[in-house]
Every structure is written in structure tokens, then in C-alpha cells.
Image: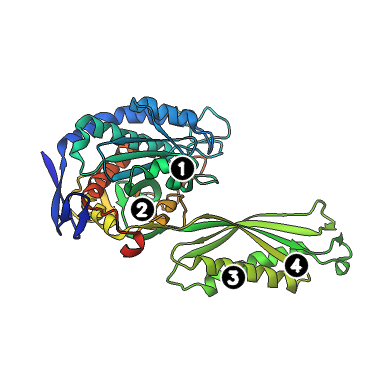
Amino acid sequence: MTVEVPISGDLQVPDAGPVRAARPVPVPAALVEALETELPGAVALRHALHREPRVSGDEADSRDAVAAALGHDLEPVAGTGGMLRLGGTGPAVAVRGELDALPVREDTGLEFASRRDGAAHVCGHDVHTAALVAVVRAVEAAGPDLLAAPLLAVFQPREEAAPSGAADVVVEPAFRAHAPAAMLGVHVQPELPRGVVSARPGPVNASADEIEITVTGRAGHGGYPHRTRDPVLAVAAVVVALQQIVARRVNPLEAGVVTIGQITAGSAPNVVPGAATARGTVRALDADRDAILAAVTQVVEHTAAAHGCTGEVAVVPNEPAVVNHGRLTAAIAATLGGRRGEERAAPTGLRLDTGFRSCGADDFSHYSAADIPSTMLFVGTADPDAEPGSAPGLHHPGFSPDDAMVGEVARALLAAVVAAGHTLAPTVSPAEEAP
């Protein structure tokens, strides 16, 4: 038995000729059945990774657990990461799974909760990685020749911290030697209801840069403020003024955000300190990233000067925006199946959403920025009947999707792998495929 999958577009597949509009792509039942067989083992792996989380840069044990679950040695990549290829020569469809956990103390109450104080999988990386292992084992069991292109599983380190694991993977010769024609990723998403998978062309996650603001004044006694130049008052004014950048300098139809999450100043309640610092994040989805950062510097300098102080901004560049490739994402969306509200069931058992995007960030963006056509999927975890935002979200100490999410993520990934192998031309860049 096969599931007939309609594909949109007229795309070139290496060594396979054109794929015509609406041409069905058969998804062999052998792959679907093999995946279901592998899910219990994948759930067990998820538990093992969750119990023994490893933070960014310390993922070797997690990588080795993945290798043991796969029954293969992994090709090293980006230090503590690993890769496994299934299939023959030629361009490959690559799939990213993240190995690292967060430096957070878990508060989920799970039977398989973290045994390591101050480290926890509260972003879903354990689910993503276990699901990718299930897909790889299913493809190997059913036969890689059932796919239209080789599969390259990339178990990536350091998604949560700099230096970015994706930025290192994408320039590594070992990765490039596999000629990745497409890059796929997935993330559980508590902003989407359970049973929904999102595949949207264009920007879906924001760029993310860190800023550190230093306001320097003149120290003195709190009882003689006229003899000082108060940097605390100035930095408070700076924080308020920064909120006007997005409100008044960014097109309201475009998305950006400036958030200050940390302010440090002073050592005593009756002393005006000589300096104050503030740290935050600047994000741009489809707003102009450089323009927002330039406005931040201008606002800091002029607001500090208005208070008799000086202001400086240091920018730590992180990720660009995650931009989903137009044709690739459209083909994957067709594969995923029925939209939310439709009666037609999807081969994955999930409903399609094409509207979701957020100002969250992910270093998956480095793949599309390097001209590898890429698609990031989001799979919902929220109770459809609950108040939005009422449950713990990503990075919350209590966030932990249930085990059934391993299967939902794996089914979405398998569908994406099949679609990508049948549709993608490796010579087409994301810039040429703007939606």
C-alpha cells in the first residue's frame, strides 16, 4: 500500500528529471510501518537523553547514546556532533536534530526527570533527536532505496549557546562533502495546538542579537544628586525609550522586538554609582534587522546624553532569521496533508497550519543563510481546550511534551524527507525562491 501525496510546482530533481505540478509522490507503506515499529525504542531513547542531559559543548555522551541507538558509529561534525548517511551517492536530504539541553533546573515531576542539577531538556530537543533516530532506523529497516534521495541525519551540538553549532556544521568540509540539497528541521511548539503541524514559506523565526548597554555618569552621594550625573535614572529612561523603536520606527506590518532582560547598577542604596549596564535581545522577523540595531545605538547615546551621561552599545551578533524555502516548503505542506478545519485526513495524522511564525530564534537559520534550501516545521503541543499560554512554554522549568510527541514529530519529519527528496533542485538558492 502507498499513500498518494500531491506535489505542487515544476521542480528539478537531480538525475530524475522534472516533477510536474500535482504529480503524486508515493510514500511506501513499508516506511510508515517501519516507523511505527521504531517508535517504542525512540521513546526509550528520549527518556535516556532526558535523564542525562548535556548542555551546549558537552554533548559527547548524548551523541554516543544516539550512536548506540542507531547501531552505527557517527561521522564527527562540529566537535561534539555526529552524522549518519543512508543511501548512495549524490545530493542528500539532511535532517537536523539537536543534542544539547539548557542550563535550567527541571521542575516537571516526570519519572524520567533530569538527574543532573542545573541541566534539563525543557526545549524539546530530546523529542526532536529521538524522532530523528526513529526516522533513520525506519529508513534503514525498510530500505534507503525507497527514498528519492539519500538521507543525511545531522545530530547537531550547541543550538542553545555560542559558538553556534549550526554555523560550524554548515562550513565543515565533512558536512559539505555530502552535497546537502535540502535541510530539514522540526521544533515542538506550545503556541500551536496538539495535532497541528506548521509549514510556512518565508521568515518563520526571528533573527536574534544580544545587546549590552553601558551608561556612564558621575558617582556621588544619594543626598546630593545635583553633584552627580545619575546613570541609574539614565538607563531607566533608555529602557523606556527603546520600546518606542518598534512602535514608531518599524512598519507595523513587519515584526521586531527589543527586550531588556537585565539591569545592573550600584552597590549601596544611598550611593549614586558611576555606571549602569543593561542587557537585552533585539529580534527581527521581517523587519530590518540592521535598522533596528542602528536605532538602538542612536536612542542609547542621545537618551544618556540628555541626562548628562554617556551611553555605549555593544552588539553580540547571533542568528539571522529562519527563512523557509518557498518551493520546498510548499511541497512539504502538500505532503503533510489536510489543513486545519478540513475533513481530509493527512497521511501524518496531523492537521496543516500555514500561518504560524514567531519571534523565537533558532540557529537552524545558518543553513538557509548558507544557501541550502531549508524548511523548519513546528509541531503543536498545546491542549486545544486550554487557555493559550496557560501551560509552561519553551525553556520553562516545567515544559515537557508527552511521549506521544515523539511519534508526531517523527511522522512529520518522514513526510518532509519524502517530499524533499522528490522535489528539490540543489542549484536553486533560497534568495531565488522568495515566496
**Element at badge 3?**
helix
Residue at the location (57% across, 66% down)? 293
Q: Amino acid at mark 4?
A: Thr
Label 3 – label 1 distance at C-alpha: 32 Å
Indicate which disc, 4 or 2, sits on the residue closer to the N terminus: 4
Indicate which label's residue lies in the foreground, 1 or 2: 2
Indicate which label's residue lies in the foreground, 3 or 1: 3
Label 1 – label 2 distance at C-alpha: 25 Å
Residue 271: image x %, image y %? 85, 57
Indicate which disc, 1 or 2, sits on the residue closer to the N terminus: 1
The image quarter containing residue 65 is top left
Circle 3 residue: 295
Q: Amino acid at mark 1?
A: Cys
Label 4 – label 3 distance at C-alpha: 16 Å
Q: Which mark is residue 123?
A: 1
Q: Amino acid at mark 2?
A: Ile
Residue 119: image x %, image y %? 54, 35
Circle 2 residue: 372
Q: Quadrant of the N terminus?
A: top left
